[in-house]
Amino acid sequence: MKKYPYSSRREFLKTSAAFAGFTVLPSYIALGNKSSSGIAPSEMINVAMVGNGKQGDQNRVSALNTGLCQMTAICDVHLEHPYVQPALEAHPKAARYRRFEEMFEKSGDDIDALIIATPDHAHFSVSMLAMSLGKHIYVQKPLAHTFGQCERMMKMAKKTGVATQMGNQGHSGGNYFQFKEWTEKGIVKDVTKIDAFMNRKRRWFGWGTTCTGYPEEPIPAGMDWDAWQDCVDFAPPYSSKLHPQEWRSWYNFGCGAFGDWGPHILDTCHRFLKLGYPQKVTAVKREGPNDLVFPQSSTIEFKFPERHGMPACDLTWYDGLGNKPKVDPALGYEVKGSGKILYSKDLVFTGGSHGSTLRIVPKEKFMEMRETLPRMTEKHSNHWSNFLLACKGEEETRSPFSVSGPLTQVFNLGVLAQRFGGTIEFDAKTKQITNHPEANALLDPAPRKEYEQYYNLV
């Protein structure tokens, strides 16, 4: 397989505008895009879409709206599915593939970057191969399905130096810039307790508790079910309870509410409070536990030690309908939907998900402080622009794997507590669970044989 010269391509993108007398077709003509940004294709990032379901298509449209890229390849295990049709119709000249290996073999030289929105269990293999070939990658949250996969992806990103971004879009929003400044200015400090919650209905509600095995349905025409399985060393039968979207319900393929909403709620807390890894993770509550499917609701407590001059911090996660943290009525705050509450020695902060900014409660305390709080007026690139500009060497990504990897690993530990119950004790130096051999084995389960090659790339 031919390796693309990463450094020369980046330099080409940065200098191509300097060439005079070079005529190129607009991107909407050259590659079938429906709109034109006015930027010559030679100056744009050539992007391959891998996984083109609901979230994948949102990413595709958002990336195109930046005016910085064009789609040169579309890869999906089920190209006939209705979710994929908008991409195929919008980019009729983009190469089409069911398997990422074939895509790199035949179209690798036409790809600068990938946007990956496959199920959680299928993030790792394509990401590792892409980075080994010098491709920049944007990977939808959570970063990977297991702790060990995250570890390898972080090492490969550091080794190759490609631009990496996890798709927790709020990490380029108001909450990111506010939280960063408020910690730097000492407004958010000495946080000792965090409550985070996600109380919306999940796909497995109502059937997860009674599940005793994987249902089976006929494989749809054109579906490459073997490719969908990816590196997981277990071959489930096809069913609509797995594809599309329902994979998040199952321990073997998804990361549940943690992987879905944790990166949108706790990303800034983890980063700017420098939480790192917990010492203990305890399943305080599991409603309707099941060996295969996530609980109907759960309360998971993480104990983070003192670090970098900051006090120890207890973080408690609540998911499931009606499963909410208790809040002092004097704060004037109602727990609903998704969000977080931060308790410091002097102040209490509340916030939502994604880019939602923090508020100081009760309101009277905020009114007392509001004239002294920093005001952010500077405009910034959004999450997709940030990634694409980083591909061109003009910005640094805000959610690189060095940041989003450890964040995802915290959720990986939380999922194991949800799965087994009780308390997990974690050694941050050895990155091992010390009191639960079965849970420790699932930090880094072996892949099926034909996918070992991707585990051995770094």
Image (cartoon, rainbow, N blue to C red):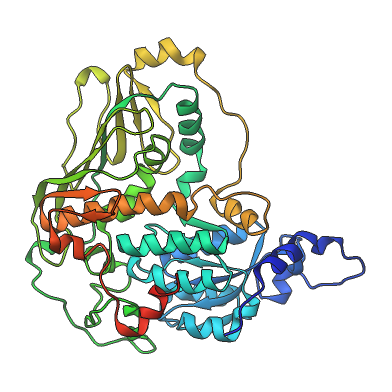
Q: Residue at horizontal 49%, vertical 78%?
A: 75
Residue 288 rendering spot, x and y as whole percentages: 8, 56
Q: Residue at horizontal 28%, vertical 41%?
A: 337
Q: Residue at horizontal 55%, vertical 64%?
A: 160
66 left or right, relative to 367: right
Q: Residue at horizontal 49%, vertical 18%?
A: 373
Q: Quadrant of the C terminus?
A: bottom left
433 left or right, relative to 447: left
Depth order, front residue of 228/187: 187
Residue 60 rendering spot, x and y as whole percentages: 54, 64
Q: Is residue 105 above or below residue 379?
A: below
Depth order, front residue of 318/112: 112
Residue 118 rendering spot, x and y as whole percentages: 40, 69
Q: Is residue 226 above or below residue 274?
A: below
Residue 329 rendering spot, x and y as whole percentages: 20, 20
Name which quarter of the figure residue 18 lies in: bottom right
